[in-house]
Image (cartoon, rainbow, N blue to C red):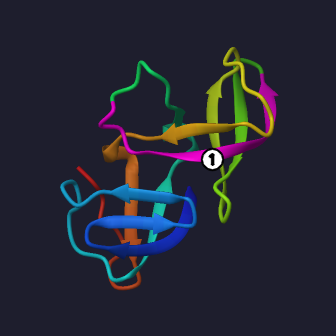
Amino acid sequence: MNVMEGTFKNGTFSESQISLNVSSHLKGTPTEKAFLGIQPDNGTIIDGSTSSATPSFEAMLEATARLGDEQLLYWNTGKNPFICKADSHINVQYGKEYNFGSSFEKVHISSEQEENLSLS
């Protein structure tokens, strides 16, 4: 699981370059210090064909590793590195920023008091 540490205030998870409003999907209320988690299999590059309702943020692509039909994409948000899997036919460029996201059902938020405040 990719885990990013940030803050939660007024229904929004924030990290150095990320600001995701999740208030309408959150089951519970985290404390101000919160963690956002996305499994590598559940992330995707957001393009024009993806729903605007998909939570997304910008991240810089730092490296790739081809694994046959798949590739691992290594990202950095400025504060947190993370990995996602993608089809090996997706063309990406190192050092370029992309919109990255995951459906609300696949994003996990937790805090020091509550382990899983999953989104719906």
Q: Where residue 95 sits in the image (x, y, percent)? A: 79, 40
Amino acid type for the residue under numbered disc 1: Ala
Q: Is residue 76 visible?
A: yes
Question: In this picture, is 2 found above or below 48?
Answer: below
Name the residue nearer the viewer: 97 or 105: 97
Query: Which residue is at 18% across, 55% downward?
Result: 24
Q: Would you call the spot at circle 1 few (<14 residues within 10 Å), some (14-19), or many (20 or more)?
A: many
Q: Is residue 90 above or below residue 93?
A: above
* Residue 59 drawn at (x, y percent): 63, 47
- Residue, x 38% and y 71% (percent of image)? 110
In the image, 65: left or right of 101? right
Question: Residue 65: x, y in percent?
Answer: 81, 33
Can I make out residue 43 in this image?
no
Residue at x-position 72% and y-position 25%: 92
Q: Is residue 68 left or right of residue 87?
A: right
Magenta-drawn segment: 52-67
Residue occupying the point 56% across, 55% down: 1
The quadrant in which residue 94 appears is top right
Relative vertical location of residue 31 with respect to residue 117 in this rendering, above or below = below
Q: Is residue 18 left or right of residue 62?
A: left
**Taking 54 as reference, is 108 above or below it?**
below
> Residue at label 1?
59
Asked whether residue 92 is drawn in magenta, I would say: no
Q: Nearer the viewer, residue 113 or 31?
A: 31
Magenta residue check for 55: yes
For residue 13, which quarter of the picture? bottom left
Q: Is 42 on the left-hand or right-hand side of 90?
A: left
SS of the residue at dot 1?
A: strand
Position of residue 46 measured from the top left corner of the image (x, y, whole percent): 49, 31
